[in-house]
Amino acid sequence: MNFLLVFKKWASALFLLFFLNQGCQQGKAPEKGLYTEVMGVHDSVMPKMKDLRKGVQYAEEKLEKGDLTAAEKTELVALKRSMMEAEDAMWEWMHAFNSERAQSDTATAYLRDEKVKIKNVSAMMLGSLEELEAFRKKMEVKSKNDTQ
């Protein structure tokens, strides 16, 4: 009889711990989803760092040639600065991102902030690359017109 009483108390405690543990794990699910979203944005634009670096090199080479109008030079200098700022923003975000904090008790708020930050970095990077592509196309058209 004494054994049965002890077993009931332990069984109740184990049962309670099991359900509390399940509740805690369910609370972590949104954080894992947010972490995956943040890393997904990062992973989608990280390979574009190489394109930014190539874009900066293109701008430097084009500026050195000196065959640009004043307006084209101004545009290309601004574009180069934009690409460098986007690259710097990605490096800064990566160095500041704290994966330990992303798994802490305050992870949800932290990851929401980081999601906004990395989306801004992504927009900077992709916007700069789109501007670069538009500039290159404009230069190609100009080159074709000059040779005709």
Image (cartoon, grey):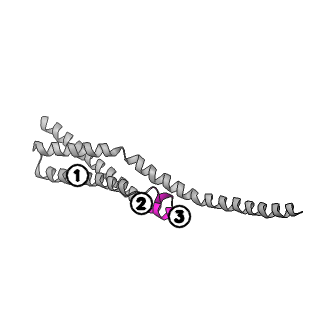
Which tag is nearer the camera, tag 3 or tag 1?
3
Q: Is residue 103 magenta?
A: yes
Q: Residues within 10 Å of mark 2 (few under 14, many from 20)?
A: few
The amino acid pointed to by label 1 is Leu
| 31 part of magenta stretch | no
Q: The N terminus appears in which quarter of the rendering?
A: bottom right
Q: Kindly identify which numbered label has been placed on residue 105.
A: 3
Q: Is residue 39 left or right of residue 28?
A: left
Where disc 3 sits, the SS reads: loop
For numbered disc 2, what is the local secondary structure? helix
Q: Looking at this rendering, what residue extends furthest in the front direction? A: 2
Amino acid on which disc 3 is placed = Asp
Q: What residue is disc 1 on?
A: 79
Query: What's the magenta bit mostly, secondary-structure-wise?
Result: helix
- Decide: is 53 above or below 103: above
- The image quarter in which residue 66 lies: top left
Measuring from the top left, give residue 77's x and y in whole percent.
18, 52
- Can residue 103 be seen at all in this image of the molecule? yes
3D distance between C-alphas at marks 3 and 1: 41 Å
Residue type, numbered disc 2 = Val
Task: From the top left corner, tell me how far across and down residue 84 is, in percent.
Answer: 25, 52
Report the span colored magenta. Answer: 99-116
Q: Which residue is more in the foreground, 122 or 30?
A: 30
Q: On residue 116, which mark appears? A: 2
User: Which image quadrant is residue 124 in?
Assistant: bottom left
